[in-house]
Image (tube, helix red, strand yellow):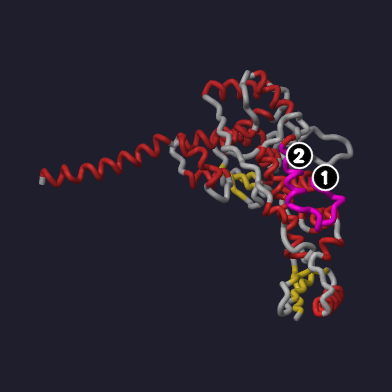
Amino acid sequence: MAAIEKRTAANGTVTYRVKIRLKGHAPDTKSFERLTDAKIWAASTESAIREGRYRKDAEAQRHTFAEMIERYLRDVLPLKSAASIYTQTIQLNWWKERIGHLAIADVTPVVIAEARDFLLAGDTYRHTKRSPSTVLRYVAALSHVFTVAMREWGWCDDTPVRKVTKPKEPRGRVRFLSDEERAKLLTACQESRNPCLYDVAVLALCSGMRKSEILNIKWADVDFNRRMITLHETKNGERRGVPLVGLALERLQERSRIRRLDNPYVFPAPPRYGEDPKHIDIQSAWDWAVARAEIKDFRFHDLRHSAASYLAMNGATVAELAEILGHKTLQMVKRYAHLSGAHTSGVLERMAAKIFAEPKEMAEA
């Protein structure tokens, strides 16, 4: 028998999900935007199953891989964060260009594995080798497309991605500034012609925020009374509060006194006629400052690693690091655990003193 379930998405979109269960046949599901279409498909499918002329992969044969990607980009991706929309649009369009001409049924694990290997062997637009981590994210984006197509649309019976070996991610990078490097870099940032670079770097070191999080801060997000910045757009999609302390607080207070009224961003781009207000671009200025400071193998994101490393070396726990950096799990911040040696040594010393002092105290008694 067929059952039709009405489903309402967070954005108010209504769909009708049909579930067909007949004895002796595997369950089948499919979603529709109109109730009429749902009823027609349910009736025709039940009839085809009883007459022995139903092929469960009919939808996978009928729709192309390109259609599946386009529907996902139109209906699913807009519900995600701005950062996810930007990166996954690039990733999914790559898959579409690569194998979009195939029917969904023809996108086998072998096809996906070949595309994965092509990605791993290729170069980025910066002419550098594409990392396993990047390829893993391409595969993860595709995996979710197949999951939605299987569970929500009924376009396929299974996801071939689950049978494909995922690239192994390397150990997390931990590159942080020494005291000498930090002083040289901040001096170079002050000497930059970019009016925001120094304050952006100070804020990154004092908070551990990502570059995109910092550049997207608006004055409405800064609460000087509470000494707090509220981040509305983060990598994991959750709103996060970041304490505003030390030199970062002083720099933003000074900047607020000369803020531009025509641009809501804390770090505004120069105004251009006919364009909406934007935040400033610091990439070229950053590259110049790193070169001037003569610091090797250092990226802007490493300021986040530096902040986390300094916190770990000053006794912050893994849980505290996760909360400050905005990680949902502890796995990502365990890379800094080895830097908290003094803190963990103190815990071990107290434990050792207690367990080995007891026999001695008992003998004296």
Classed neighbour count for the residue bearing mark 1: other residues with Cα under 10 Å, few (<14), some (14–19), many (≥20):
few
Task: Give the mark nearest the N terminus, 1 or 2.
Answer: 1
- Residue name at image x 60 percent, y 43 percent: 224
Q: Using the image as rendered, state which of residue 92 and residue 13 is in the foreground.
A: 92
Element at label 2:
helix
Q: Position of residue 163 (x, y in %)?
A: 68, 53
Q: Secondary structure at mark 1?
A: helix
Q: Is 49 rendered above or below residue 130?
A: below
Q: Specify the quadrant that holds the N terminus.
A: bottom right
Image quadrant where residue 51 sits:
bottom right
In the rendering, at what x and y percent does residue 185 appear? 61, 23
- Position in image of residue 235 (x %, y %): 66, 46
Q: What percent of the width, then of the height, locates residue 176?
A: 55, 30
Please name the residue that numbered disc 2 is placed on: 118
Residue 48 versus residue 279 in the image, above or below? below
Name the residue located 85 percent from the left edge and 72 percent from the top edge.
34
Amino acid at circle 1: Arg
Observer able to see residue 359: yes
Location of residue 48 by image quarter: bottom right
**Three-letter amino acid code at the position of disc 2:** Phe
Report the predominant secondary structure element of the magenta stretch. helix
Q: Write down the residue under mark 1.
A: 98
Q: Residue furthest front?
A: 52
Q: Is residue 74 toward the left or the right of residue 331 in the image? A: right
Left or right: residue 105 compared with residue 355: right
341 or 316, which lies in front?
A: 341
Contact, mark 1 vs mark 2 (Cβ under 8 Å)? yes
In the image, taking residue 342 as reference, residue 223 lies left or right, namely right
**Residue 102 among magenta residues:** yes
Q: Is residue 70 magenta?
A: no
For the magenta stretch, what is the residue range? 93-120
